[in-house]
Every structure is written in structure tokens, then in C-alpha cells.
Amino acid sequence: MKTEKRNNGTNTVKKVIVDLIQTATNYDVETLDTIYHNDLNVIMIDTDDNLNTANKEAFKGLFKSKRDAGDPPMNTWAKFHKIDVNGKNAHVLLSRKNNLSGQEQILILSIDLVFEDGRWQVTREVIFLRPEEN
């Protein structure tokens, strides 16, 4: 019981997201493969209300292309707004500063996770882009 409680605690889920940020911003595609669930679904809405979707392979490809191009690591800034854990499911709401789309922007992320195969895995990311305000 104690192990299950530790696995499902908000601190554990927060650490997974912090690890995800470090992994993604440094383009560690191999580690992303273990954090992202095979059924990952990414939905991104940009500042012009364009909707883009990606599965696991496509989203990992974005980071792989940045790595292969020699891009410098991305910003790791994050502000956690809410973490909910309910059994084997978790949800994290956070803000990030990132240049995922080519210019520095604020991202609002809604991330769903599932505890499966002995670890938390990201099943869905909904990303809302907005221009960084000066």
C-alpha cells in the first residue's frame, strides 16, 4: 500500500513532468520514448487558432529534428498550477516559456498521465500557445 501511495502522489507526478521538461528541452528522444505512452495524443492550438495534432512518433520527431539541427536546449521555465492524482490517472496544468514554434512564447499545458508498466506515462498533452508579453 505504501508503494502505491508513493507512486500515485502529486510529488511523484510533478517529478515526472520536471523530468519530461528536462528531457524534451535537451532533445533526449530515447528517454522521451519511455515517458510518452504509445497512445500519446498531442493537440496544439497556436495564437492564430490553428489546430495541430501529433501522435507519439510525430511529436518525438519534432524534438529529433531540433536535436539533429544542433539547436540549443530550450527554456526549462515552468510554473505548476494544479496537479491531480486519482488512482492510476493524473492531470497536470502548467505554464511554460518555450520556443517550440520558432519564437519564444508562453505555453499553457494540460497533461494527462496514466500509471502503467510500473511508471507514469504521458497519454495526452493539450498545448495552448500565446505570445510572450513584454
Image (cartoon, rainbow, N blue to C red):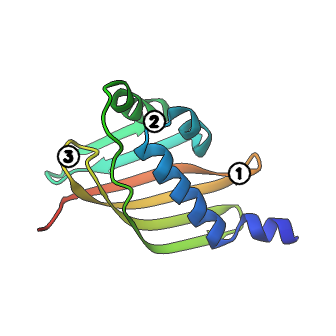
Q: Residues within 10 Å of mark 2 (few under 14, many from 20)?
A: some
Seen in the picture, residue 16 relative to 37 is either above or below; the reply is below
Question: For the residues marked 2 and 1, what is the alpha-carbon distance in whole angstroms?
Answer: 20 Å
At which x and y percent is residue 33? 57, 36
Q: Amino acid at mark 3?
A: Asn
Q: Report the quarter where the C terminus lies.
A: bottom left
Q: Mark 2 and mark 3: span between their CA atoms?
A: 17 Å
Q: Where does residue 133 sit, x and y in percent of width and height? A: 14, 67
Identify whether 29 is placed above or below 41. Answer: above
User: Residue drawn at (36%, 43%), measured in percent from left and top?
Assistant: 73
Q: Which residue carries the number 1 mark?
A: 119
- Horizontally, residue 132 falls left or right of residue 125, namely left
From the image, tell me which residue sits under label 2: 55
* Mark 2 or mark 3: whose residue is earlier in sequence: 3
The quarter in which the N terminus is drawn is bottom right
The local secondary structure at tag 2 comes to strand
**Image location (x, y in percent) of residue 79:** 39, 70
Q: Nearer the viewer, mark 1 or mark 3?
A: 1
> Residue at (38%, 60%) from the top-left corner?
109
Which residue has dot 3 on it?
50
Amino acid on which the number 2 mark rests in the picture: Asn
Nearest the eye: 66 or 120: 66
Q: Total marks drawn?
A: 3
**Hey, which quadrant is residue 8 in on the image?**
bottom right
